[in-house]
Structures are given as structure tokens and as C-alpha cells.
Image (cartoon, helix red, strand yellow):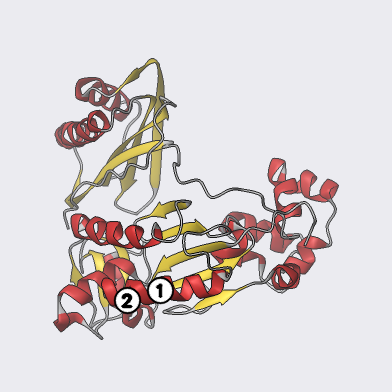
Amino acid sequence: MSDLTPQRKIIHVDMDAFYASVEQMDNPELKGKPLAVGGSESRGVVSAASYEARKFGVRSAMSGLQAKRLCPELIFVRPRFERYTEISKKIRKIFRDYTDLVEPLSLDEAYLDVTQNKKGNPSATLIAQEIRKRIFDEVGLTASAGISVNKFVAKIASDYNKPNGQKTINPEEVEAFLEGLDVKKFYGIGKVTTERMYYLGIYTGADLKSKSIEFLDEHFGKSGRHYYYLVRGISNSAVKPNRTTKSVAAEHTFYTNLTSEIFMEEKLERIAGELSRRLQKHKISGKTITLKIKYSDFTQQTRSKTLPYFISDKGLLFETAKELLYQERMKDSVRLLGISLNNLNTEIKKSVVVQLRFEF
């Protein structure tokens, strides 16, 4: 480990198959059965899959049709985001019994900085064990955890002994741990970058570590230097309990594909109304409106426009989204539309989740 890296004690807690586990907890008849949340046999996309379903290859972001082909016994349930939010709040309350430095990433995962903690416990490993036990005893769900000196390594470690397990990477173990990993397991390195690295002969952390800053800068631009330090375990990003909202979005998957822009207008007005209500409730506004279009073949397109002033009004959101809708002809029938607002007023520093009820 480099002397430049602060010796923090970071825990990444990740709930196990959260949405599916909540459904199985609330409905005992679903326990032990392959379950998909957020999809249907003929429509929609899987938001989460139980571990029983994952054994068949069912994964999130997969079409319901493909999931059913992989697992004919798969059971589909509609998502209940209000329930998931309720459970998430209970879990975060447990986190804050140990530290105020809690950075939620989503409803089902968060970073905790326990370097200085409310229990006075010097062992982050023991704290993680205690937190996981409390989540199980008080909420009824299992969680996995990764423990290390920074967020990057803790995030990778939390995936190692899933479900219902944890892994600690001690300071002196970090570099060897990262050297042995396939680069596709590095958090933040996606499919396209992984393929580019493979093409360049970079398959493992050790391969990545062997490359100079100049080589990485040449092939990966600004990200090159970032990768150079990451593989050496150098990541000084602090746990930020008040993450600044960068984007707020609402989207809707339709029961049947839409072929006419007139019908799309009607749906966009509803989406703009829901987005506007949430924005105004949290006193958020922004300048950049993006229209998201997902076609029947699952290809996706976005169209954006930046205004010279901040907006949160339904009428302005709808009119701008409608303008983007007619910017060019549709390539195919449409299964999903969404509106997002970026370039937000920077005074707002709170996490906001906007989610419309899905139709399948």
C-alpha cells in the first residue's frame, strides 16, 4: 500500500438479492423458488432475481421473455418500491447506530466509514459482522459486506462471499488482492473498457499494474491515470453522507409497444407530471432535459436539450420532452419512455429516488 493512502476502515454493505428477498420474506410461499421482480413472461425487464433464479442464468436487466426461456418455472412479481424504501430506511437506521458517515449508493447498498465509530470498536470486521446480524434479526434479510482501507476495494470485496458473507482485505493484502483479479471485476471498469484492455493484453490486475502511466494515458485518456492508482490500492475518495444529486429521472415501460407519437405524447405528459411533483417536493430544478427512448428490439436512444434557466415545472418539462420526441423519426415501436433532468441547482445535497410504477 502507498503511504499516500489514508488508513481508513471502510465497510461496503450490499443486501442479498434485495427486491426478491423482500418479496420472499413478505410471502413465505415464494421462499426457495425462482423469482423475478420487475418483469413478466411477455413484457418488461427483470429488476432483480432471487438466487434460485440466478442458478438458471436469470439476471437483472434481462427481458422477461429471455428469463422465462432460461427458467420455465420462474415466478414474476410486480415491484413494490414503497415497501423496498421502507425496509431500506430501517437498514440505514442500523448503520447510523455505528457511524454518521454513511453513503447510500441505492436502496440496497451503502458505504460506511467506521475509522472512528460510535461503538468505539477498533475492528471493522467485527462491526460488519454485528451489522449483518442486526439486519437479519431486526429486518429479516441477509446482507454481505466487504471491509478494507478504501471504498474501491471494499466494494469489490463485498461480492466475494455472497450471499450472507463478508470478506476483509487488510492493508498489507490490498495490492496482492488486486493483482490477482480479472480486470472485469474492477468496480468502474465496464464491458467496453474490459474488451479494450483484453485487446491490449491486460487481463489481470498484475497486467494492468505493469503498464506505465504514459501507456494508460495513451490508450484510456483521462481514465488511464485513475486505473494506474486504483490497481495500486490508492483511492482517497471519502465516504460522503450527503451525496449531491446529479440527475433525477422518471420512466415508464408500457404494456404494449407504442407506434404513434400522439400516444407517446400522452405518456410523456404523465411522466413529466410525476417528475415535476418529485422535483418540487425536494426543491430541485435543472437545466438539461433528456428524453430516453427504448425500442421494441431493446436498443436505446437519448436526446437532450439544455435551457438557459432552471426548471421543475411540468409544462416546461413536457414541452421540451415533446420537442425532443419530434426531433427525428422513430426507428421502431417504443416499449419505454423516460425523462431525466440534469445540470441541477447545486445547492441541493440529498439523495432523491424517482420511480414510476411499471406496467407489464
Q: Report the side of 184 relative to 274 (left or right).
A: right
How many residues crowd mark 1 within 10 Å: few (<14), some (14–19), many (20+)? Answer: many
Q: Could you say whether the residue bearing mark 2 is in a helix, strand or loop? A: helix
The residue that label 1 is drawn on is: 132
Residue 18 lies, in percent from the top left, at: 32, 68
Which residue is most to the front? 120
- The residue at the point 24 percent across, 28 percent down is 280
- The residue at the point 72 percent across, 55 percent down is 234
Q: Do the residues labelled 1 and 2 touch (CB within 8 Å)?
A: yes
Badge 1 amino acid: Arg
Residue 284 lies, in percent from the top left, at: 32, 28
Spatial CA distance of label 1 from label 2 is 6 Å
Is residue 177 in view from this perspective? yes
The residue that label 2 is drawn on is: 136
**Residue nearest the observer in this picture, 19 or 122:** 122
| Image height of 322 relative to 336, above or below | above
Q: Quadrant of residue 98?
A: bottom left
Is residue 331 in view from this perspective? no
**Residue nearest the observer in this picture, 340 or 90:** 90
**Residue nearest the observer in this picture, 123 or 291:** 123
Q: Report the side of 19 relative to 180 (left or right).
A: left
Q: Could you say whether the residue bearing mark 1 is in a helix, strand or loop? A: helix
How many residues crowd mark 2 within 10 Å: few (<14), some (14–19), many (20+)? Answer: some
For residue 46, which numbered disc appears in the image? none
Residue 261 lies, in percent from the top left, at: 21, 33
Q: Quadrant of residue 171?
A: bottom right
The C terminus is located in which quarter? bottom left
- The residue at the point 38 percent across, 54 percent down is 106
Which residue is most to the top? 308
Badge 2 amino acid: Phe
| Image height of 252 relative to 194, above or below | above
